[in-house]
Amino acid sequence: MEDRIFFHIDVNSAFLSWTALSMLQEGSETDLRLIPSIVGGDMAKRHGVVLAKSLPAKAYGIVTGEPVVNALRKCPTLTMVPPDHDMYHRRSQELMGLLSDICPDIEQVSIDECYMDYTPIAKKYSSPEEAACQIKDLVRDTLGFTVNVGISDRKVLAKMASDFKKPDLVHTLYAREIPDKMWPLPVSSLFLCGQSSVETLRKLGILTIGDLAHARRDILEAHLKSHGITLWQYANGIDDSDITPKPVKMKGVGNSTTLQRDALTREDAQPVLLSLAESVAGRLRASKELAGMVSTEIKYATFQSVSHQMKLPTPTASSQAIYEAACRLFDELWNGQPIRLLGVRTSKLVPETEPVQLSLFDYQSAASQPAPDSERQQRLDKALDNLRSKYGKDIIKRGSLMDSPANPISS
């Protein structure tokens, strides 16, 4: 385990951040993240619990899980909005899709947090800290919300590190840093140490994580059973668990990227669309899926977003077919304004082994253009996939991507 490095990536106040972002995209002039606000409960009936809070609300002493009526007593001017769980699920899928494109070794542990194994991508970065900073900046610039990233050689310590000062920050908590960074903290800060355990430990005179780390195991076990041993192990940074990716049935595969400088021409945009199409198609092939729908997204320098989608004649995982569809949609969408972000997404996925039944219209459409999944194209895609899998996704690039005037931050 000594050579392994883990990231824990956690969305800052996820439900509130996602709600705020959605309201801003719908034209709201108020950013919930900048005012005392909460997600949860019913404003009219004044009941329910706080599901998420803004930093200004936290300053009033409002905590997650408390009754909203208590929160309103603490801050009578509090803004309260209801949750939108369908939207939260979509935001979570966007985040995990973006992170999976950076490194597929991801273990999602909740709707707004996951572990990532840094080891497979280590050669691409000068340090774990640099990689973590790039990841958090990419999430912020591409998806519009912020995350904290914790870094450690133990999963539980990476989780602890991501809970340090927020938002939009990177923290380390390696095993060697435990005495200085973790032991002085109250036991309530320890992962899985709930209020009941905190009270039991307080009666034993154990107030800090350091006190817990140096406590006798038999006494902890006598009062807290096996959970006491688990807390003692975590307090000492003992955790040999590994990343355990959980396969998830995908409804779609997509990728988007914020450009280092605005794209001003079609020629600027095309190499970016090609890079995105290759990334999306590669992920489709890796999951043995074919896409029946392609959509292109444009975000202008004014932050206005537009998107359009089209059905493909035949479900495909061909880079070329997805690129051509993305370009066609781009031509239909673009109004000539400077472009800040481009995205390519696919949906209506089917297993690559599933027979595809074409309608007469599909046959006519397919006959009017070259077959995108020719044997030659499939061999090329497979060869590129093998090279990227073995040596990293940047080992080979098309010549048209090398000198793109609108190089994406990430593809």
Image (cartoon, helix red, strand yellow):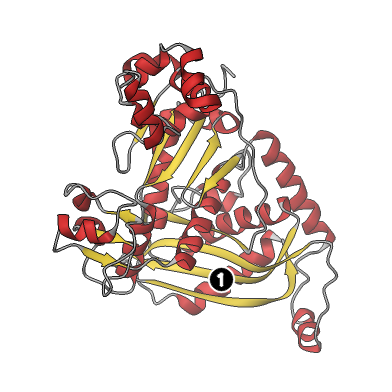
Q: Please report the residue visible at 38 percent of the width from the left and 27 percent of the height from the top.
A: 200
Amino acid at pointer 1: Ser
Q: Is residue 47 visible?
A: yes
Q: Residue at x 54, y 61 (%)?
A: 273
Q: Position of residue 22 (x, y in %)?
A: 36, 67
Q: Quadrant of the N terminus?
A: top right
Q: Secondary structure at mark 1?
A: strand
Q: In the visual, does 198 lie left or right of 318?
A: left
In the foreground, 63 or 247: 63
Position in image of residue 48 (x %, y %): 34, 63
Please give the name of the residue rendered at 45% of the width and 50% of the height, measured from the top-left corner: 407
Q: Residue 209: percent from the left, percent from the top? A: 36, 21
Q: How many marks?
A: 1
Q: Name the outermost residue toward the left.
A: 76
Q: Is residue 254 left or right of residue 234?
A: right
- Pick the residue in front: 331 or 136: 136
112 in relation to 115, above or below: below
Residue linked to disc 1: 295
